[in-house]
Image (cartoon, helix red, strand yellow):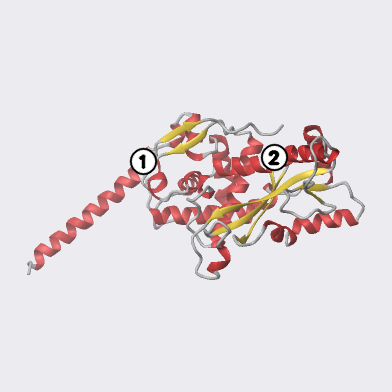
C-alpha cells in the first residue's frame, strides 16, 4: 500500500492538472474572439451574421442567467455555443471541443436548452405570425404575380426531424421510414418566411391528420365563414381539398385547364419545399439522420428556435450562398449554392 503522503501528493497533482485545464479553457474563451473572423467565415460557423448576433446579445440578455457561476461561461458565449449547435447539431468537435468555444458538452447542452427556451417563450409571437388582413392581401398579390393562382396566402407541408427514441409512447414516434421523428408542419409565404410552425406531433402522424388539428385550419375556416372566401393555402395531394386549402387535381390530361392549374399550383407550392431546404441547410441540427438527440419536448423547443432564427435571417437578408458541409474534424467544405429565394 502506498504511503498516505504519496497518495496525498498524487491527489494534489491531479487537482493541479484539472485546475490548469480549467484555466486553459477560460484563457481560450477570453482570447478567441469569433468577431475577429472574416464575415463569410463567421456566417459559415454560426449561420447568422455579426449584426444579428449582436442583436441577439441585446435582446436575450434580459432573460438569461447572467451570473452562471458554476461554469463562468458568460451569456454571450452561451448564445454563440447555442448558435453553433443549431448550425452543426454536434455536441462534440463541432461545438464543445472547438478552440473558439472551449466549453464542455454539459455546458453546450444547458446553453442550447436555455437559448431555445428564451427564443420560444419571448420571441415566437413577434417572429412567427400568421399574416393579418393587410399582409394577406400583399401576399396574395405576390403569389398571383409569381404563379398565377389567386387568393394564396401561403403553402403548407410537413417535414420529419429525427429525434432520440422517447421513453414514453416510443412507438408513436416511429414514422413510415422506420426511424423516430417529430412530424413538423410548416406554413410559409412566397419569401420563405415561416408564418406557422407546429412541432407537437409524433412521426407516425400523417400530414393530413396534423392539418385537421391545426389552429391555422380553424382560423382559415373562420375567415371563410366570415365572408373572406378567396383566402387559401396550397398543399400537396396528401392533404384534403377544402375551401381554404387548394390541392392538385388528380388524373388530369396534358394541356387541359386542370393540367395548367396543376403546373401553376406546383410553382406556387415550391416555396414550402424551398423553405424546408433553406431551414435545414442553415440549421443542420434538424437535418437528416443526425437529427436531435433529445426528448420530444426539448426537440420541439429547438425546432421552434431554429424557425425563429430562420425568419430573422430572412428579414435581415443573410445570404445562404453556399451549401456548407463539415467533415468529422470540423473542417468546412463548400458545395454548390441552393436556389435563390422566390421573389
Q: Quadrant of the N terminus?
A: bottom left
Is residue 299 visible from the viewing direction of this image?
yes
Is residue 65 visible from the viewing direction of this image?
no
Q: Quadrant of residue 199?
A: bottom right
Q: Mark on residue 21?
A: none
Q: Mark on residue 270?
A: 2
- Residue 251 appears at what percent x and percent y? 78, 46
Seen as rendered, the residue at the extreme right is: 227
Question: Which marked residue is nearer to the observer: mark 2 or mark 1?
Answer: 2
- Residue 35 appears at what percent x and percent y? 46, 34
45 relative to 11, above or below? above
147 relative to 62, above or below? above
- Residue 68 appears at what percent x and percent y? 44, 56
Helix, strand or loop status at disc 1: loop
User: Label 1 belongs to which residue?
Assistant: 329
Residue occupying the point 7% across, 67% down: 3
Looking at the picture, tell me which residue is in the foreground, 139 or 28.
139
Amino acid at each position: 500500500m502506498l504511503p498516505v503522503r504519496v497518495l496525498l501528493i498524487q491527489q494534489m497533482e491531479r487537482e493541479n492538472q484539472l485546475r490548469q485545464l480549467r484555466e486553459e479553457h477560460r484563457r481560450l474563451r477570453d482570447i478567441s474572439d469569433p468577431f475577429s473572423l472574416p464575415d463569410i467565415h463567421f456566417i459559415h460557423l454560426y449561420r447568422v451574421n455579426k449584426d444579428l448576433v449582436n442583436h441577439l446579445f441585446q435582446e436575450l440578455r434580459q432573460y438569461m442567467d447572467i451570473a452562471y457561476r458554476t461554469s463562468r461561461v458568460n451569456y454571450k458565449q452561451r448564445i454563440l455555443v447555442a448558435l453553433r449547435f443549431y448550425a452543426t447539431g454536434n455536441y462534440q468537435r463541432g461545438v464543445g471541443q472547438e478552440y473558439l468555444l472551449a466549453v464542455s458538452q454539459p455546458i453546450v447542452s444547458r446553453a442550447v436548452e436555455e437559448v431555445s427556451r428564451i427564443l420560444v417563450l419571448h420571441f415566437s409571437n413577434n417572429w412567427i405570425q400568421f399574416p393579418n388582413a393587410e399582409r394577406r392581401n400583399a401576399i396574395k398579390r405576390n403569389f398571383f404575380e409569381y404563379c398565377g393562382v389567386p387568393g394564396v396566402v401561403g403553402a403548407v407541408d410537413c417535414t420529419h426531424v429525427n429525434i432520440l427514441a422517447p421513453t414514453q409512447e416510443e412507438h408513436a414516434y416511429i414514422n413510415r421510414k422506420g426511424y423516430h421523428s417529430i412530424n413538423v408542419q410548416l406554413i410559409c409565404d412566397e419569401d420563405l418566411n415561416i408564418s406557422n410552425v407546429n412541432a407537437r406531433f409524433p412521426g407516425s402522424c400523417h400530414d393530413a391528420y396534423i392539418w385537421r388539428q391545426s389552429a391555422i385550419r380553424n382560423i382559415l375556416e373562420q375567415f371563410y365563414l366570415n365572408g373572406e372566401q378567396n383566402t387559401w393555402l396550397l398543399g400537396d395531394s396528401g392533404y384534403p381539398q377544402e375551401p381554404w386549402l387548394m390541392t392538385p387535381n388528380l388524373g388530369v390530361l396534358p394541356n387541359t385547364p386542370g393540367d395548367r392549374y396543376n403546373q401553376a399550383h406546383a410553382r406556387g407550392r415550391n416555396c414550402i419545399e424551398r423553405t424546408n431546404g433553406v431551414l435545414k441547410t442553415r440549421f443542420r441540427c434538424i437535418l437528416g439522420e443526425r437529427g436531435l438527440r433529445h426528448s420530444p419536448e426539448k426537440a420541439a423547443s429547438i425546432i421552434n428556435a431554429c424557425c425563429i432564427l430562420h425568419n430573422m435571417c430572412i428579414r435581415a437578408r443573410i445570404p445562404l450562398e453556399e451549401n456548407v458541409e463539415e467533415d468529422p474534424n470540423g473542417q468546412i467544405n463548400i458545395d454548390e449554392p441552393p436556389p435563390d429565394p422566390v421573389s
